[in-house]
Amino acid sequence: MNFLRRNIKYQLMPIEDLIKTRYNYLIKKIDERDVKLLNVLFEKININLKTTGKEIYLGARDVNFKNRDDEIMLFQPNKSWNIEVMIQGFKISEGGKLTPIWKISDAKLY
């Protein structure tokens, strides 16, 4: 694993399809503008690092989901969320594929 000296925060366009899986959260239908901007950012971290699809899995350990009044609430599916991600670095699989190390750092109802 290759960690950055400083984490990079990135605010995604509002997300409508945020799904809780057993261990992570799945963002479906990430906005095409976010994909382009994230790939520009990832290229600066490592020329071969890219996000490929419209779906991404993110960890969310210690994240507080908040309502519009900044009050902590339980995660609710089928809601629109403003999601901020923290990019921490990247890892290389045994097959040589690079993937970002990132997680949800903030989540607020849209």
Image (spheres, rainbow, N blue to C red):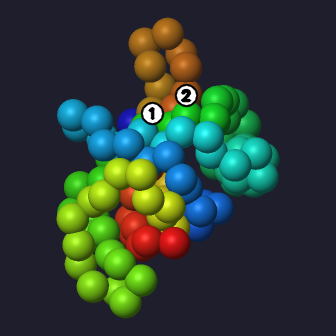
Left or right position of 29 against 80: right
> Residue 85: horizontal and vertical position, in percent?
48, 60
The reply to whether residue 9 is visible in this rendering is no
Task: Tell how many labels.
Answer: 2
Task: Compare residues 4 and 54 and report the one nearer the observer.
Answer: 54
The answer to whether 30 is drawn above or below residue 13 in the figure is above
Q: Which residue is mark 2?
A: 98
In which quadrant will I find the N terminus? Answer: top left
Quadrant position of residue 65: bottom left
The type of residue carrying mark 1 is Lys
Which residue occupies the extreme front position in the image?
A: 78
The type of residue carrying mark 2 is Leu
The reply to whether residue 53 is visible in this rendering is yes
Task: Compare residues 108 and 62 and report the one nearer the observer.
Answer: 108
Instruction: Say which residue appears at 27% left-offset and 85% top-offset.
Output: 71
Q: Which residue is mark 1?
A: 91
Q: Earlier in the sequence, mark 2 or mark 1?
A: 1
The answer to whether 9 is drawn above or below residue 72 in the figure is above
User: Around disc 1, counting alpha carbons within 10 Å, would you say few (fewer than 14), some (14 to 19), or many (20 or more)?
Assistant: some
Instruction: Say which residue appears at 44% left-offset and 59% top-offset.
Output: 79
The reply to whether dot 2 and dot 1 touch (C-beta < 8 Å) is yes
User: Around disc 2, counting alpha carbons within 10 Å, would you say few (fewer than 14), some (14 to 19), or many (20 or more)?
Assistant: some
